Image (cartoon, rainbow, N blue to C red):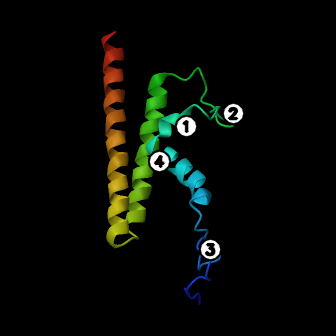
Amino acid sequence: MLKVTDSHVGSETESAIPCCSADPKDLHRPTTRSRNYQFRPAALVGTFALKPGVIFVVAPDVDDETLISHACESLASASVMAGEFAGKLEGTQRNMMLALQQVILLGELALNRLLVMDKTAGEAR
């Protein structure tokens, strides 16, 4: 067990805990980096080159209706999985999973509406 003891005379910068430095200069760089990441993420966005992955690619000749239908089916499957998983949880974890299922359902509803609007617009042409 670690004991906190008085430091030796003349060693004001030494910490009672050997792994922790009391020198604020040692903490400045990581603290600034963390603060910049949390409070100014836009400043860091330009520093990374984001390249799309080439492992999974959506075929460029697939029409919008097919993409929307596939997204709706994927969200419906995710909703079922979240509901099944929520049934095995209790308390706040169950509530969080049910909230996630609700967000998935809202996305599915929005895509279904877009799909219905796309079909009706196609029939009107």
In the rendering, at what x and y percent does residue 57 appear?
Answer: 63, 31
For residue 118, side relative to residue 59 (left or right): left
| Cα distance in 3D space between marks 4 and 1 | 10 Å
The kind of residue tagged 3 is: Glu
In the rendering, at what x and y percent does residue 81 appear?
Answer: 44, 57
Number of marks present in the image shown: 4
- The dot on residue 54 is 2
| Cα distance in 3D space between marks 1 and 3 | 35 Å
Q: Are marks 4 and 2 in contact (CB under 8 Å)?
A: no
The kind of residue tagged 2 is: Val
Residue most toward the right? 55
What residue is shown with label 4? 38
Q: Residue at x 55, y 23 (%)?
A: 62
In the rendering, at what x and y percent does residue 124 appear?
Answer: 30, 12
Q: Is residue 80 above or below residue 124?
A: below
| Cα distance in 3D space between marks 2 and 1 | 24 Å
What residue is shown with label 1? 44
Q: Is residue 75 above or below residue 84?
A: above
Tell which of 88 and 1 is nearer to you.
Answer: 1
Q: Is residue 25 above or below residue 53?
A: below
What residue is shown with label 3? 14
Number of residues whose C-alpha sits closer than 10 Å to that of mark 2, classed few (under 14), some (14–19) or many (20 or more): few
Secondary structure under tag 2 reads loop
Q: Are marks 4 and 3 in contact (CB under 8 Å)?
A: no
